[in-house]
């Protein structure tokens, strides 16, 4: 699997700490920034990841910012992206299983740092269950199409 990875300044250190875990999980990643903890605008980095996912250059995205929320909101503006903020392994797993989420957003300032590796492991171990959830995900896609 290949993913796009990005953070803002608040998530930079955690993004860097996640790279060895991703490698251990056999996940190839393209780091789309930022490159330091100097202040940046998180939408610039979230949209890079979202576009990579939407265009099919990568299968999934991983975003890290202060709360996860701003990047998820931004990523969800890109058609075809279903970004979810996860603060536990359960929320990460359910986002994949029930919502077919393709971008994970994590809050480095709001999530205990020791929990973040477990959240990432749960996300990448889970798969979309389909079934009754497929129609719900299709409704999301229909809403996206209606906005265009």
Image (spheres, grey):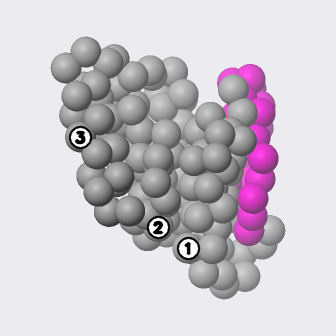
Residue 36 appears in which quarter of the rendering?
bottom right
Residue depicted at 42% across the width and 58% down the height: 76
Q: Is residue 90 shown to the viewer in this render?
A: no
Q: Is residue 95 positioned above or below 80 on the image?
A: above
Mark 1 Cα-neighbour bin, 10 Å: few <14, some 14–19, many ≥20? some
Q: Do the residues labelled 3 and 2 touch (CB within 8 Å)?
A: no
Residue depicted at 71% across the width and 41% down the height: 57
Q: Are marks 1 and 3 in contact (CB under 8 Å)?
A: no
Image location (x, y in percent) of residue 45: 64, 67
How many numbered dots are placed on residues in this image?
A: 3
Residue 29 magenta: yes
Q: Give the range drawn in magenta.
A: 13-34
The residue to which callout 3 is attached is 139
Residue 131 numbered mark, or none: none
Mark 2 Cα-neighbour bin, 10 Å: few <14, some 14–19, many ≥20? some
Residue depicted at 59% across the width and 64% down the height: 47
Q: Quadrant of the C terminus?
A: bottom left
Q: Is mark 2 on a helix, strand or loop?
A: helix
The label nearer to you, 3 versus 2, is 3
The residue to which callout 2 is attached is 74
Q: Is residue 71 positioned above or below 63 on the image?
A: below
The residue to which callout 1 is attached is 43
Q: Do the residues labelled 2 and 1 touch (CB within 8 Å)?
A: yes
Residue in the foreground of this view, choosing between 14 and 35 = 35
C-alpha distance separating marks 1 and 3: 26 Å
């Amino acid at each position: 699997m290949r993913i796009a990875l990005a953070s803002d300044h608040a998530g930079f250190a955690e993004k860097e700490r996640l790279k060895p875990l991703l490698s251990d999980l056999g996940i190839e990643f393209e780091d789309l920034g930022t490159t330091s903890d100097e202040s940046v605008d998180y939408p610039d980095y979230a949209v890079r990841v979202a576009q990579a996912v939407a265009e099919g250059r990568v299968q999934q995205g991983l975003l890290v910012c202060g709360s996860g929320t701003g990047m998820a909101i931004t990523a969800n503006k890109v058609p075809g992206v279903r970004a979810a903020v996860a603060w536990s392994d359960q929320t990460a797993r359910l986002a994949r299983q029930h919502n077919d989420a393709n971008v994970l957003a994590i809050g480095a300032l709001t999530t205990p740092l020791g929990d973040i590796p477990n959240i990432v492991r749960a996300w990448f171990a889970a798969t979309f269950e389909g079934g009754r959830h497929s129609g719900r995900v299709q409704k999301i896609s229909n809403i996206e199409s209606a906005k265009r």
